[in-house]
Image (cartoon, rainbow, N blue to C red):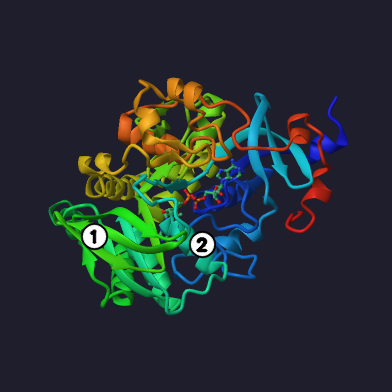
Amino acid sequence: MTTQSHLAHRFQTLIVGSGPAGIAAATCAAEAGHRVGIIDDNPNPGGQIWRSLRGQSTPDTSHGDGASEWYRRLTATSATRLQGWSVFDQPEAGIVRAERQGGTVHLHYDNLIIATGARERFLPFPGWTLPNVMGVGAIQAMVKGGLPVAGKRIVLAGSGPLLLAVAATLRAAEAIVVCICEQASLRQLAPFALGLAADPAKIMQGLRYKAATLDVPFHTSAWPVEADGDGILRSVTILHHGEKQQISCDYLACGFHLVPNTELAAMLGCRIEADNVAVDELQRTSISNIFCAGEPTGIGGLELSLIEGQIAGLAGAGQDKEARLLLDKKRRASHFADRLAAAFALRSELKELPQETTLVCRCEDVPYGSLKQHHSWRAAKLHTRCGMGPCQGRICGTATHFLLGWNADSVRPPLLPVRIASLASLEAPLNSATSNTQETP
Ligand SMILES: Cc1cc2nc3c(=O)[nH]c(=O)nc-3n(C[C@H](O)[C@H](O)[C@H](O)COP(=O)(O)OP(=O)(O)OC[C@H]3O[C@@H](n4cnc5c(N)ncnc54)[C@H](O)[C@@H]3O)c2cc1C
């Protein structure tokens, strides 16, 4: 028998992730008349690019890329918004479990849309675990959250368009961006830059970032080989066109493009192909009532995430005809994803970055030398505890995939570290647990 409490937890469409893809999916499904829930582990909606600014509970609308309009549309629907909840398990088909400090909920769904986004790829090099060496997206999030960086010397290094976007954020916060080091060569980047000419929105975005960072040196074929300091970062050594150069700095923000968050989809049994969640043209995964939209299907940028979110929301709500109207747009936006992948493909020299003593798994303190003795991720895990700490291999698993070609053979619950009480399934009432953020019809 369905209890009253379970009724409150039951959705025709449940979306995991309230970044651009999730917001678009929830809006379209709710506008099509579905009873919708959207859940996210951040305290506020917006995902990575629209992450809210300090003290605000709404997405960052300063990019002028449609955030405010999407948020207005979402809040005009009756979708239930659950912020601050992490989905960590599926106790049985059609139900996911989520945890927030102080409670666990079981959420029942007819259709699930996975919109869990992407994360940065970190590659280990000597000194990468020093305080003040951090992710490019991490420093952006911290600055949006109020970290004062005015007058601080910051080096940005790694790969991908995020380097330029974050340089612009840091300049706006009055930091001194010493230089941007992109591992890709000029030859690799040129076709990508030329291809932007066909896309006025992307040209405008690129020009905005470039205007904000005009006086910042942008080095291609450059990457960090060592970070130095006496307990805290003091300098970074960059290899630039084969020459080493030591640069003093207060922060090194480093990230080697992005990797899709496919773990939830994999845990639910959806097929993963070439590191992405496999979907059909209407974003349906290999499990018929589970859809996936945005970065887990491949790194494609904001526009593609929004289109895929709309298609998944409409298709999940049975509006296939309306969803199909977006397919041309999706095809065009997918070309950008292909160009991104080619432009920022990692060079093989980066496999030489870690030394024997360089920590690869920083949760469990496992150095590269110990890992190399094993032949698979599973063997390394069993013998060294690599990937068994709080990040559950999200950082070191991604690094060893690149460095050693290893793949995780399975993803098992809990997806994230959770409290024993959550594992014991002590369920909190949804309405009390979400009273500060839930929008009710
Ligand atoms: C660190 C970072 C910074 C970025 N900054 C920029 C930028 O400045 N400019 C730019 O153009 N692009 C940026 N991007 C790229 C941008 O995020 C994408 O282009 C696009 O917007 C992704 O949208 P999305 O909805 O697919 O994913 P996201 O925006 O990543 O949203 C996914 C959401 O799902 C949540 N989630 C994941 N797993 C769970 C779970 N198990 N339970 C609950 N919630 C979960 C995440 O916390 C997140 O809020 C950034 C990407 C990253 C990784």
Q: Give the total number of marks visible in the rendering.
A: 2
Picture coordinates of residue 281 (x, y %)? Answer: 40, 35
Q: Tell me if 178 is positioned left or right of 190 in this view.
A: right
Picture coordinates of residue 348 (x, y %)? Answer: 21, 40
Neighbour class for label 2 at 10 Å: few (<14), some, many (≥20)?
Answer: many
Alpha carbon separation for disc pair 1 and 2: 27 Å
In the picture, which quadrant includes the C terminus? Answer: bottom right
Residue 141 — which label? Answer: 2
Q: Which of 371 and 14 is in front in this view?
A: 371
Q: Nearer the viewer, residue 80 or 180?
A: 180
Q: Tell me if 76 is positioned left or right of 197 in this view.
A: right
Q: In this view, does 317 lie above or below 424?
A: below
**Residue occupying the point 52% across, 28% down:** 385
**Residue occupying the point 42% across, 71% down:** 170
Picture coordinates of residue 235 (x, y %)? Answer: 34, 64
Picture coordinates of residue 45 (x, y %)? Answer: 60, 57
SS at mark 2 in the image: helix
Residue type at mark 1: give it: Leu
**Residue occupying the point 50% across, 28% down:** 266
Q: Are marks 1 and 2 in contact (CB under 8 Å)?
A: no
Q: In this view, does 350 lie above or below 217?
A: above
Q: Can residue 159 be seen in this view?
A: no
Q: In this view, does 184 lie above or below 403?
A: below
In the picture, which quadrant includes the N terminus? Answer: top right
Q: In this view, does 373 lie above or below 183?
A: above
**Is ligand 1 closer than 8 angstroms to the Cβ of mark 2?**
yes
SS at mark 1 in the image: helix
Residue 196 — which label? Answer: 1
Of callouts 1 and 2, the N-terminal one: 2
